[in-house]
Image (tube, rainbow, N blue to C red):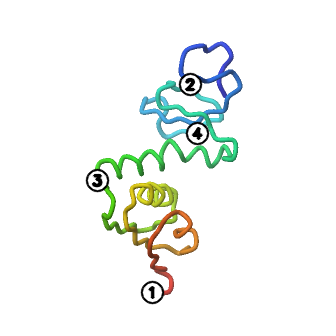
């Protein structure tokens, strides 16, 4: 939640619930309900996302985005995602779909993988 005394940062208003990540040493390996973070990596938490769901944005979502960017994914690329329905995998599937890649996902939950954008699923509990 944005502190009413903080008038710096982005277009955040006091009371806004935000999600963020930090590479600062004091923010590593810890969990907190409230923390001091820089405004640059912060974003307003969508209303339809719980705080627990939002807490994954700063790690899983960020890493998935970094992976897609560094791999230079483009339309028509064929990508295999192992463990596609974990935190990282579900974000990765959506980003790959957005880039119009053809995605084969290994998973225990084919329905979830398809709903996140997988073109094909391999259920490794039955295959």
Query: Residue 31: which disc?
Result: 4
Q: Are marks 4 and 2 in contact (CB under 8 Å)?
A: no
Q: Is residue 96 above or below residue 18?
A: below
Counting from the top left corner in percent of width and height, residue 88 is at 47, 56
The answer to whether 112 appears left or right of 77 in the picture is right
- Circle nearer the N terminus (4, 3): 4
Q: Are marks 2 and 1 in contact (CB under 8 Å)?
A: no
Q: Tell me what residue is drawn at x 66 percent, y 20 percent.
A: 3
**Label 3 element class:** helix
Q: CA distance from mark 2 to mark 1?
A: 47 Å
Q: CA distance from mark 3 to mark 1?
A: 28 Å
Q: Label 1: which residue? A: 127
The answer to whether 113 appears left or right of 52 in the picture is left
Q: CA distance from mark 4 to mark 3?
A: 30 Å
Counting from the top left corner in percent of width and height, residue 87 is at 52, 57
Q: Nearer the viewer, mark 1 or mark 4?
A: 1
Q: Residues within 10 Å of mark 3 (few under 14, many from 20)?
A: few
Q: Tell me what residue is drawn at x 65 percent, y 35 percent.
A: 33
Query: Residue 36: which disc?
Result: 2
- Circle nearer the N terminus (3, 1): 3
- Circle nearer the N terminus (3, 2): 2
Q: Tell me what residue is drawn at x 44 percent, y 44 percent.
A: 62
Q: Residues within 10 Å of mark 2 (few under 14, many from 20)?
A: few
Q: CA distance from mark 1 to mark 4?
A: 38 Å
Q: CA distance from mark 4 to mark 2?
A: 12 Å
The answer to whether 126 appears left or right of 1 in the picture is left
**Label 1 element class:** loop
Query: Residue 71: which disc?
Result: 3
């Amino acid at each position: 939640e944005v502190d009413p005394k903080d008038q710096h940062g982005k277009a955040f208003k006091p009371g806004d619930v935000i999600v963020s990540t930090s590479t600062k040493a004091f923010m590593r390996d810890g969990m907190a309900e409230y923390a001091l973070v820089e405004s640059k990596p912060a974003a307003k938490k969508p209303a339809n996302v719980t705080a627990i769901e939002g807490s994954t944005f700063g790690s899983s979502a960020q890493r998935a985005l970094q992976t897609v960017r560094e791999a230079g994914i483009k339309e028509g690329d064929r990508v295999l995602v192992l463990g596609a329905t974990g935190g990282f995998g579900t974000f990765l599937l959506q980003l790959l779909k957005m880039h119009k890649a053809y995605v084969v996902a290994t998973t225990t939950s084919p329905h979830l993988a398809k709903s996140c954008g997988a073109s094909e699923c391999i259920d490794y509990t039955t295959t």
